[in-house]
Image (spheres, rainbow, N blue to C red):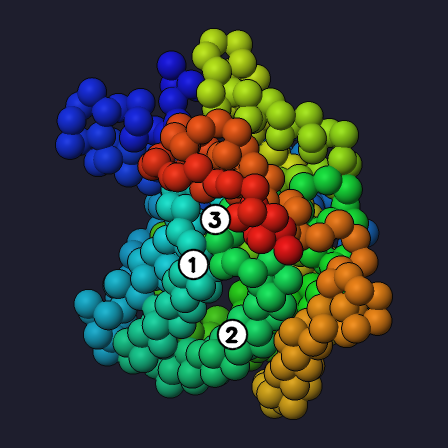
Amino acid sequence: MMFAAQSIAEYFQRFGGWQYVIAAIIHAVLLVHVFAVSPFAFIWLERKVSGRIQDRLGPTRVGGLFGWLQSLADGIKLVQKEDLCPPAADGMLFRSAPYIVCVSSFAAFMVLPFSDGWVAVAADCGLFIMLSILSLEVFGIIMAGYSSGSKWSLFGGMREAAQMVSYEIPLAICALVPVIASGSLNLGEIGGMQRGWFTNWFMFHDPFTFIAFFVYFVVATASCKRAPFDLAEAESELVGGFHTEYSGMRWSFFFMGEYASMFAVCGIASILFLGGWNTGLAPIDQALYAARSAGSDGTGGAAAIGYLANVIGAGVFAAKASFGVFVQVWLRWTLPRLRIDQVITTCLKYLVPISCFLFLGAALWPILMVAGTGRSTWNSPIGDRAAEGLQETREGGGDVAAVSASGVDLGMNFPRINEAELEGVVR
C-alpha cells in the first residue's frame, strides 16, 4: 500500500490531521540520513582521491582494504574530544554558529528532488528557495569569526563572508540560464523536461547554457569554500580561518555542512544542466517513465515496479552529483591557491560580466533561432515535453491521483484540458 500511495501523507491519512506531521517527520529523518551519510562518504573519497593524486594509498587500516570506515573512526575520535569555548568568546554565539551552518545546508535538501516526485517540498519556486537557504550559511561563518574573541578568526570570517557573498551573484545568474530555457523554477519540472536522449539536457540546449554549466561549477566550488578558493583556512596561515578556536564535534559540524553543500550545489547542477534523474538514453528513460506512470495508479506489482524505477532514478541523480563532488576534490589537489585579491577580482571583474552575458544570450537565443530557422530550439521543443504531463491529465479525466510528469505531487482536482489548450501550451 505504501508503494501505491500517492504520497506519504496519503498513506497515513487514517490518522486524521496528524498525517502531515507524520509525513514531515519521515521526510526529515530521510533527509537527515542524506545530510549525514554524504559527508561520511565524501570525506573518505577526499582522502582516497588525494592519496592517489599524490601517489600514495590513503586510508587502508580501518574498515578493510579501502579504509571505508575511516570517516566513522574520525567521528568517534571527535566525539571524545573536549568541547572548548575560549574565555574571551561570546558563549551563545560561539556555540550556535556551527548549528546555523549545518541547518542552512540541511534545509536546502527539502526542495531538492532526488527522483521523479521524490522531494520533501515540491515548491514551484524550488530553485529560488534552495539558493536562498544555502546563502544563509554566511551568517554562521560571520558569527563564528566574530564570537571567537580572536582577531585571526575575525579576519578569516570576514574574508570568507566577502568571498561567499561575491560568488553567490554569478552562481544565481548562471542558475537562471537554464530557467530561461525551461520557463520554470520548479526543480522537478526542470528535471522532467530533460527526459529522452542526452541531447535534451539543458547543457546542450544552446551555446550559452553549455558555457553556463562550467561557469556555474566554478562559482559553486568557490561558494563552498573549496580550494583553490579556500583562502580563509589556508595552511600557509597556520590558522583555521573562522573556525580556528573550535574543537571536537563543533569543529566537525563546519565540515559536515561544507560537504553537504558540495553535494547540494552539484545536485542543482545535475538537475539544471545534466538531466537530473534521467539517464540520457531515450529507451531507458521512456521505460522508467512508463513504469513510474503505471505504478502511480496501480497496485501490487505495478506499484513496486514504479517504486523501483524511482530508486534507479535516484541512483542516477546521486551518481551525477557525486561525480561533481569528485571533480571538486580533484581540483583541490591539483590547482594551487589564489591570493584573496585574485579570488575577488576573478569574481567581480570576470565571472559576473560573463554570467550576465550568458543570461542575456540565453534570453535572445530563441529569438535568433526563430528568425533564422523558424524554430526556437535545434532539438525537440521543450513545450512538447512539458505538455506530456498535461496530455496524461486530459486522458485520465480530471482527477489527478498520481505524481505528475513534472515530478510534482499534485494531489488535487484539475479541470479537463481540451485540445486547443494543449496545443497552446506546446506552442
Q: Residue at x 79, y 73 (%)?
A: 371
Mark-to-mark CA distance, 3 and 2: 18 Å
Residue 49 screen position, x and y as percent: 71, 50
Q: Quadrant of residue 176?
A: bottom right
For marks 3 and 2, the one nearer the N-term is 3
Residue 59 screen position, x and y as percent: 65, 42
- Disc 3 marks a residue whose amino acid type is Leu
The disc at residue 115 is none
Q: Quadrant of residue 132?
A: bottom left
Q: Residue at x 20, y 69 (%)?
A: 91
Q: Nearer the viewer, mark 1 or mark 2?
A: 1
- Disc 1 marks a residue whose amino acid type is Cys
Residue 113 lies, with reference to residue 227, above or below; the image says above
10 Å crowding of disc 3: few (<14), some (14-19), many (20+): many
For marks 1 and 2, the one nearer the N-term is 1
Evaluate whether residue 218 shows in this view. Answer: no
10 Å crowding of disc 2: few (<14), some (14-19), many (20+): many
The residue that mark 3 highlights is 112
- Front-most of 22 and 339? 22
The disc at residue 168 is 2
10 Å crowding of disc 1: few (<14), some (14-19), many (20+): few
Residue at disc 1, secondary structure: loop
The residue that mark 1 highlights is 125
Viewed as shown, does residue 47 lie left or right of 300? right
